[in-house]
Image (spheres, grey):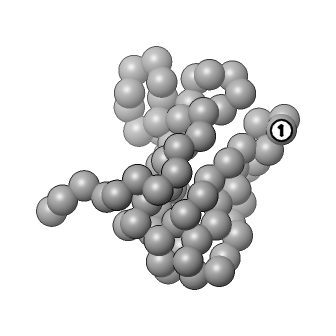
Amino acid sequence: QKPPVITAVRVHRDGQLLATAGDDHRVRVWSLTDGKLVHRLEGHHDWVRTVDYSPDGKILASAGNDRQIRTQD
């Protein structure tokens, strides 16, 4: 199985986390200190096109081709 195509990348304001979105309908959150996967968020039904943290860093939002906006706090 080939790795997903990454469509968006965002760094958390504290510089410790990196969120990626992809064509596999998932959002992943990675630790920038050790490169390990911290969270895998599912729920989209098509490519996830964008991901971003709220200004205070408490909410992660994603949107995709399925016309959904999903949030995770």
* Residue designated by label 1: 55
Q: Answer left or right for 55 relative to 12.
A: right
Rendered-image quadrant of the N terminus: bottom left
- Determine whether 59 is above or below 2 in the image: above
Coordinates of residue 39 in the picture (x, y in percent): 50, 46
Q: In this orientation, does residue 72 appear?
A: no
Q: Answer left or right for 41 relative to 63.
A: left
64 or 40: nearer the eye?
64
Q: Secondary structure at mark 1?
A: loop
Q: Total label count? A: 1
| Residue found 59% across the figure and 40% down from its top | 10
Residue furthest to the top in view is 33
User: In the rendered image, which quarter is residue 56 located in?
Assistant: top right
Coordinates of residue 30 in the picture (x, y in percent): 47, 36
- Determine whether 32 is above or below 63 in the image: above
| Residue found 40% across the figure and 53% down from its top | 6
Q: Answer left or right for 58 relative to 39.
A: right
Coordinates of residue 61 in the picture (x, y in percent): 70, 56
Is the residue marked by circle 1 packed among few (<14), some (14-19), or many (20+) residues within 10 Å?
A: few
Q: In this orientation, does residue 63 appear?
A: yes
User: In the rendered image, which quarter is residue 44 located in?
Assistant: bottom right
Residue furthest to the left in view is 1
Residue furthest to the right in view is 56
Q: Disc 1 residue type?
A: Pro
Q: Answer left or right for 5 relative to 65.
A: left
| Residue found 47% across the figure and 71% down from its top | 47
